[in-house]
Amino acid sequence: MGEHMEQQFDAVEAHTVAVLLDYEGGEYAETLGAQADYDFALNGAGNLKYVMFSVYGHMVGGGIMCLADCVTIHDARLVMVALAKFWDVPHGDHMFNPRG
């Protein structure tokens, strides 16, 4: 890192994310914690567009920032682990492959 650059993140994590349609046809994203969340997005809410896997950085001093949206769980894990090693910070894997 440069002489005047401070480390921006103190942890990295990855989540399964649903991209949903709102009532006006716009898109929004929600993290999915379990299969039941996916089932609700697919069958209950009925507005699931697609699922992706997102990598987030925990910012020093608070807050999070999305660093990458990946098509596969494998790609998200690669990005998460690489960034955690690069910044020498812990990482957390909160992803799952939805069934259905």
Image (cartoon, grey):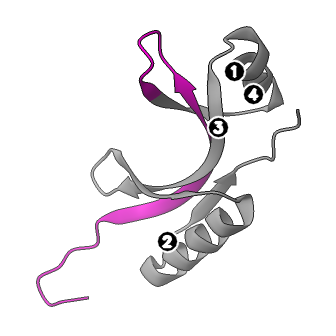
- Residue 59 versus residue 96: which sits nearer the camera? 96
Residue type at tag 4:
Tyr
> Residue at 71% of width from left, 49% of height from top?
95
Give how far across and how far down residue 65 sits, in percent. Answer: 36, 51
Residue type at tag 1:
Ala
Whether residue 70 is situated above or below residue 28 in the rendered picture: below
Q: Which residue is mark 3?
A: 50
The answer to whether marks 4 and 1 mark residues whose Cβ atoms lie closer than 8 Å is yes
> Residue at 41% of width from left, 63% of height from top?
10
Residue type at tag 2:
Val
Name the quarter where the N terminus is drawn.
Answer: bottom left
Label at residue 38: 4
Q: Which residue is mark 1?
A: 41
| Number of the front mark, 2 or 1 | 1
Q: Which residue is mark 2?
A: 89
Residue 79 seen anywhere in this rendered image of the structure? yes
Looking at marks 2 and 3 on the same chain, the residue that comes earlier in the sequence is marked by 3
Q: CA distance from mark 3 to mark 1?
A: 10 Å
Give how far across and how far down residue 11 sits, in percent. Answer: 47, 61
Q: Which residues are magenta?
A: 1-27
The answer to whether marks 2 and 3 mark residues whose Cβ atoms lie closer than 8 Å is no
Looking at marks 3 and 1 on the same chain, the residue that comes earlier in the sequence is marked by 1
Mark 1: few/some/many CA within 10 Å (<14, 14-19, 20+):
many
Query: Is residue 44 in the magenta section?
Result: no
- What secondary structure is marked by label 4? helix
